[in-house]
Amino acid sequence: MISDSPNILLINPWIHDFAAYDYWAKPIGLLYLASILKTHGCNITYIDCLNRFHPNLSKTVSSKADGRGSYLKTRIPKPECLFDIQRNYSRYGIPEQWFRKDLLDAKQPDIVFITSHMTYWYPGVFETIGIVRETYPFAPIVLGGIYASLCHDHALKYSGADKVITQDGEKIILELVKEYTGFSNSIKFDPEQLDSYPYPAFDLESKIAFIPLLSSKGCPFSCPYCASAYLNRKRILRSPESLINEITYWHKKHKVVDFAIYDDAFLIDAENHAIPVLEGVIKTGIKVRFHTPNALHIREISKKTATLMFKAGFETLRLGLETTIFDNSRLDSKVSKLEFEHALIGLKEAGFSKKQIGAYLLAGLPDQDERNVIESIKKVIENQITAIPVYYSPIPHTALWEKAVLCSRYDLRSDPIFTNNSILPCRKEGFSWEIISLLKKLAAS
């Protein structure tokens, strides 16, 4: 036990997968924890295994102007259970020797926090934990994040972490530090009040190519394919002023232009939340770009919100459409045909182009007729916007999980590796390059 400021190591782990790309992806939860720990007197070291701007890079990596870009990758053997999939498998992120060197360069940690993301990316998490354990055998390792929450028993049994947490790290992070190190400090924020949080510690990164924004946690909907309602049992909001201040801070102090909105429900109750944010950004006069990789609720797009989003600098709009089959076969009731059409009219009249507007369409669902996916792509293109097929990944603790288990050709309960959307786990005919190529070609037409 120590009474001096403890050395805390936080790690964003590798990805093991058939494909991965940085679509404005950052471990915002882990970096919130880093900032909270720093605010409370801890010494922080952060290692990002997915760092696209690592100091060891001999040349500038390929990166889009809006912050997106390719990860470094190293081809590795596929898991034996996936050898039927005719695709290359890779470790995405920095080379192993760079990670080992970064670990050795860090201060001896008193505790290590590692996050996790997609459930089927756990092999990258396990490899990360294994190397940390080799390097610092006596440092306690705490695993959190999405995989740890959705597949808690699997993580407890196989990850090698000393502790696996399923609740919001912000609520217990200081207790964990005290438990493992004896260090404590008076609490300087309220876990239930997002406005009281310090800004995420993006200043720990090698380069800030973009900033993710979280103006709320949780979602009022319970879509059967989404785990948001399970991961965040209630919705809590930041004040519009808090979000505007953060955007202004990153833009003025760190020259950040691109911001990705991570909210699951940014436009819900727009009059009291999104609209004041948009009006506030416009009032500041700053020139920034906003992107919505988590999708916007189409029903909430009015002519007013569309106009304000355009004026505020929204550049990339992703709409949560799912399908253009507007009948009882839909998995959710978030949007009707008329609402979809009205939203598009509002967006186009506001000034958004076809290139800027994209509609997510779910493919690979249990018992899905692929002809409906093809028809949906065609309908979206007819509406002069971009069609974006999104392949379904079965997620534990969602309403669709049991049906996915029954439909899948894999034993989904036995191993999260089988939930990888790249292998089309719920397609009874098996993985098919033909259907993927067809949908991709149609969407690009």
Image (tube, grey):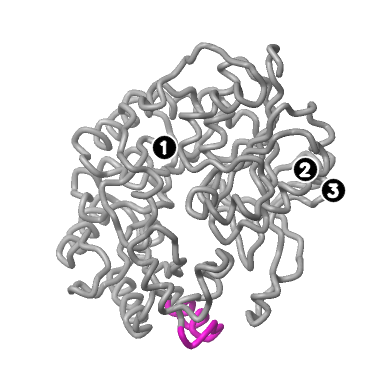
Dot 1: within a 10 Å radius of its alpha carbon, few (fewer than 14), some, or many (20 or more) residues?
some
**In which image quadrant can residue 26 be found?**
top right
- How far apart, in angstroms, are the residues tagged by discs 3 and 1? 34 Å
Residue type for callout 1:
Leu
The residue located at (44%, 26%) in the rendering is 246
Q: CA distance from mark 2 to mark 3?
A: 15 Å
Residue designated by label 1: 214
* Residue 237, placed above or below residue 67: above
Residue 52 makes an appearance in the image = no
> What residue is disc 2 on?
133
Checking the image for residue 97, the label placed there is 3
- Label 3 or label 1, whichever comes before in sequence order: 3
Q: Marks 1 and 3: in contact by CB < 8 Å? A: no
Question: What type is the residue that disc 2 sits on?
Answer: Arg
Q: What residue range appears in magenta?
A: 428-442
| Three-letter amino acid code of the residue under disc 3 | Gln
Q: Position of residue 374 (x, y in %)?
A: 36, 81
Whole-number angstrom distance, CA of label 1 to CA of label 2: 32 Å
Helix, strand or loop at label 3? It is helix
